[in-house]
Image (spheres, grey):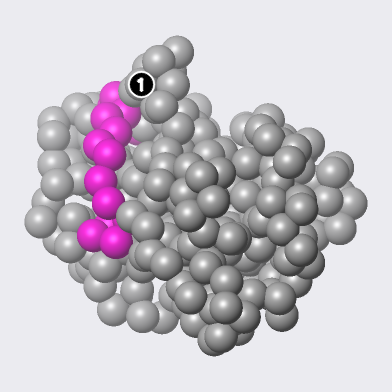
Amino acid sequence: MTARHFRTGALVAGAALVLAACGGGGQAGGGGTTGGATAGGADLGLVKKGALTVCSDVPYPPFEVEDASKPSGYGGFDIDLLQQVADKLGVTLSVQDVSFDALQSGTTLAAGQCDVGASAITITDARKQNLDFTDPYYDSLQSLLVKKDSGISSIKDLAGKKVGVQQGTTGKSYAQQHAADASIVDYPSDGELWPALQAGQIDAILQDYPVNFQHQKTDPSYVVVEQYKTNEQYGFALAKGKNPKLLEAIDTELKTLRDDGTYQKIYDSYFSTAGASS
């Protein structure tokens, strides 16, 4: 998962950098199916005919959330992007809730449970050993969330404190490297991390900034006290070496979404408020 220090409006600027960095993802696909893919994705090697099956660790707002109003029953930045991709490929979008650790390790994808992993997954060299990644689609930050009256104002104040992290994430790695005197507590997902902080079972959460910022917006008695630049980017993940045609098709459609302005509209719907408040 991710990191970068944002000031006012910089989140949107960061998105622009990602868009520029991702420009080589393939030829723009227009409004129909992509790269010669047939309707229904018959030639894309999908695990389920007529559907793009996505595995994601839910909830992880604002990237993955349950949303009964959406066609797949799920929403969030990642899912909304892939809904657009699925629509352009002429298939439905199916979402399965899985553990992040199994997803980022490549286990879930290698087993053929789904076509794509979409769970705010940071592209790292270690993960590339077991996964193929699309072009990066998002830049973010790591951050530290605490209760306002905690007395914690920076990562330097974490000695002897309990810091919650999500297992298998780059947030955990950052905490291990920079908060060595803290007690680091693993949780399967943000769905357990956030209630643990509210219940006083941990003193802080170190994870992706947009997720911590969402909690701050939900409950102003909590505050993001620091953000950490790590130059990370998210990518959608596929099983290593198994489906280059689908990988190319997704990259092509991501470029189309950038070129026609759809990406920016989805991005702004989730992050423009965060950018203005940082």
For residue 57: magenta?
A: no
Up the image or down, 87 lies above or below 45; here it is above
Is 268 or 28 nearer to us in this picture?
A: 268
Nearest the eye: 56 or 201: 201
Residue 161 left/right relative to 129: right
Query: Few, some or many C-alpha atoms within 10 Å of disc 1 (few <14, some 14-19, many ≥20)?
Result: some
Residue 107 appears in the picture as rendered: yes
Residue 237 can be seen in this image: no
Residue closer to the observer: 28 or 147: 147
Asked if residue 105 lies left or right of residue 4, the reply is left
Q: Quadrant of residue 52?
A: top left
User: Which residue is located at x 84 percent, y 44 percent?
Assistant: 277
| Most distant residue in the left direction | 111
Task: Look at the picture and state if 32 lies above or below 227.
Answer: above
Q: Which residues are magenta?
A: 88-103
Which residue appears farthest toward the top when viewing the image? Answer: 69
Quadrant position of residue 97: top left
Q: Is residue 55 toward the left or the right of residue 275 in the image? A: left
**Magenta stretch: includes residue 94:** yes
Name of the residue lying farthest toward the right: 8
Query: Residue 263 appears at what percent x and percent y?
Result: 62, 38
User: Where is residue 256 drawn, in percent x and y?
Assistant: 55, 41
How far across and down, in percent of the image, does residue 83 sit?
A: 42, 30
Q: Quadrant of residue 124?
A: bottom left
Q: Residue at coordinates 28% horizontally, 57% vertically from top-left?
A: 103
Say which element carries label 1.
loop
Mark 1 highlights which residue?
A: 73
Residue 173: image location, x then y, percent: 48, 77
Residue shown at 75% from the left, 38% from the top:
220
- Residue under the point 45% across and 13% down: 69
Disc 1 marks which amino acid?
Gly
Q: Left or right: where does residue 55 sit relative to residue 179?
A: left
